[in-house]
Image (cartoon, grey):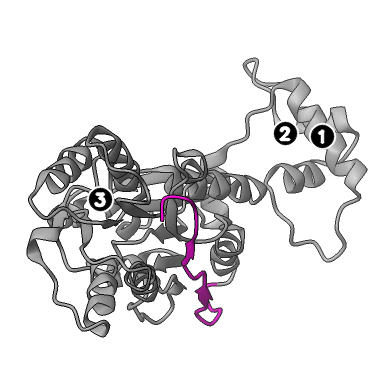
Amino acid sequence: MSREGRTTLRDVAEAAGVSVATCSYVLSGRADRTTPLPEPTRRRVEEAARQLGYKGNTAARSLRRQRSELIAIVYAPPVGPWLDRLTWECEDVAAEHGYSVIGVPVRRIDRAAQSLRVITRGHVDGAIFTPGLSDDLDLTAARRSTRALMAFSDNLELPGVDIVRNNVRQALSEATTYLIEAGRERIAFLSHTGSHDDRYLGYVDALQQAGREVDPALVRVGAASREDAVVVVRELLDSPAPPDAIVSESDRGGFAALQAAVDRGFKVPDDLAVIGTGNTREATYAAPPLTSVGMHQLDFTEMVEALFARIDDPSLPARELSMPWVLNHRASA
């Protein structure tokens, strides 16, 4: 009989015709038996639990397993379709492992320690640091406090941390070189914050390799906001010596550049070539379709599975995953 109207584990076991131990094994999400349970038995237990409305003691199960059954995605706002896709795939893989996903925004580096307390105090079993954060943060405390850590970075090397390499600097250099070889003379760069990160450095590399100087008037901040980007690109196009090409640190800025070009009567790509960054799905149906630097396909399944492999066995050697960015050619350039 259930106590105080609450369905117990014994109730579910009796309804499914199995022992309480078998019922507990199935509903705890464990998979460590030498001989796996028959799939019909597992389904019968799960169906009985669903029909009876059984609510397991998640906190007690987590305590027994010494797991929080949570993973975190650490990101720097503003967010975009790239992060949406990563989050969706994390949720799908996490659900298969009996886990949930939480987001941890870090808007300001000087407040990062407070934002990251959910990780440094051991409240999650694993964390993924998205691009643009790992190189500016000290991940030592996070590595000590969680079972698994993964970071997007082309520069970071930290024992016990799985690293995803995108080769961002090289990809942006190749994109800018493509514009130079196409005969573009005044190539502007639309930045997120004005900091000299790998995207900007790739742009500089290409100019220097072509024997060109960086023109400060062509390097502007505005890629983080579509509204700001429209204003900035309009100003560039209204100048006495407007650019004939724009490389944006985001697709968001690239879309704004397309809009500003129409506003000012510039034809794309004849008068103005535009390249974004991120290779979001929206790039394929912009008008015209936006040439963009980024992963050819947004598929994060391998890296998320690698995170869970480390959660299950933190002693695994650190992995380095290569997910290179490439120039995805479309009509805007």
Give the amino acid at mark 3: Val
Residue 116, compared with residue 207, is above or below; it is above
Q: Which mark is residue 9?
A: 2
Q: CA distance from mark 1 to mark 3?
A: 45 Å
Q: Identify the residue at horizontal 24%, vertical 73% (top origin).
A: 201
Where, by quadrant of the figure, is residue 165 drawn?
bottom left
Which circle's residue, 3 or 2, is located before the other in the chain? Answer: 2
Number of numbered markers: 3
Residue 210, compared with residue 230, is above or below; it is below
Residue 256 is one of the magenta-drawn residues = no
Give the amino acid at mark 2: Leu
Which circle's residue, 1 or 3, is located before the other in the chain? Answer: 1
Give the amino acid at mark 1: Ala
Instruction: From the image, give the main secondary structure of the stretch colored magenta.
Output: loop
Q: Identify the residue at horizontal 41%, vertical 50% (top origin).
A: 332
Instruction: Identify residue for label 1.
Output: 13
Residue 330 is one of the magenta-drawn residues = yes
- Mark 2 lies on a secondary structure that is helix
Residue 87, compared with residue 207, is above or below; it is above
Report crowding for label 2: few under 14, some 14 to 19, many 20 or more residues within 10 A (C-alpha).
many
The magenta-colored residue range is: 314-333
